[in-house]
Amino acid sequence: MRTWEGVCRMFIDRFSFHPIAEGGLVRDGLRRLRGLRAPEFDRTLGQPLVREGLAALHDGDWDRVAALYSSQTADDRYLWIDLMGGLWPVARPLPSGARRGAALKVAGGLLVTLAWRHRGAGPAHRVSETARAEMQDRLRHARMALDMARQADGADIVALGFGLRAAMGLSDHEGVAAQTDILLTTSEACLAADLALLTAWEARWGATQEDMWAVIRDREHQGPAWIALEMRGRLQDCVWHEHMSDVPDAAERHKTRRDDPNYTAELLQLQAGALAGLERPQPRARSLIAHNVIGASMAALVGWPTAAPHLEAIGPHLAEGAWEQIEDMRDPLRALGRMRARAGLEPLPA
């Protein structure tokens, strides 16, 4: 006898005769019909001001948006903007009226996140011309807003982090260098912006892995959370040398390095320092970002069981971007369940 799911999947397009419903969508629909709605992934990552910020944006209240921005630490500001940009409807324009420094920083950061959403995931050759044009248009507007904010208020490390991402998307290497020079003069600490800086100087974005490591060594002394920079750098070395480099024998040489017991011992020592340091009070977003980044690197480079303390620390708040190189993130809740199981952890309560 056919199951209801099987019957639902047999609905077909009368012209193509292909199923029109994906299995996951069918299952979610059946759960709703039975009153068993599937749990939803919390895309605010538990950050307390995301919903309030979105409500202010929907109302076009840029004064409230600016006040919320100014009330947070740098890492919380950065993650707040990025999460709102992930939740704002991608085709909906932002409300007009952002004219002052803090509001312009938020508007610029939101446009950067929305631009990268327009691009979509995957390698550059798979991005359509329409998506690329829309992305670049938003990035140009983002850069204008961020430049105006800097002229009004001076350098802000959060705005500079988003400015780096704008320059990367526009393939503007001079812009990356200019944003970097300004960022390195700022005094406020922001792990999220430094991770954007690291990415901007990777070989896959037109620099070199040596450039990336120079950035890491310059920025890593700001606290235990910045151990995440070295962890990300090691993961990106693996990605570049073993999967992307054209240098003969690069993959074999890097695999040999990773097989050295000293390499694993170094990672475990770094992790121990991070875990001890992150027990001390930190801005919430900084701790969350660090645990996600370090957990992903340990899972990839040492093994899933070593990611367990980081998965425990983040709970349900999975930062998808930190894990997307090693795990399918199309369904974050299921991905988190798979990852916890591999790490030897019990499922999170429903």
Image: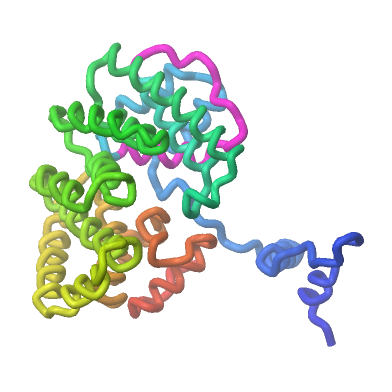
Q: Residue at x 21, y 53 (%)?
A: 209
Residue reaching furthest to the bottom? 1
Q: Which percent across, then down, holds residue 245?
A: 30, 61
Q: Is residue 100 magenta?
A: yes
Q: Which residues are magenta?
A: 76-101
| Residue at image coords 39%, 24% | 143
Write down the quadrant of residue 140 in the picture.
top left
Q: Is residue 218 left or right of residue 100?
A: left
Please tell me which residue is depicted at 25% across the width and 57% down the height of the picture.
232
The image position of residue 72, as x and y in percent, is: 29, 32
Q: Is residue 67 magenta?
A: no
Q: Quadrant of the N terminus?
A: bottom right
Q: Nearer the viewer, residue 286 or 91?
A: 91
300 w.r.t. 143: above or below: below
Quarter holding residue 341: bottom left
In-front residue for pair 301/289: 301
Picture coordinates of residue 281 (x, y %)?
17, 48
Q: Residue at x 23, y 32 (%)?
A: 177
Rendered position, 180 above or below 212: above
Rendered view: 43 above or below 82: below
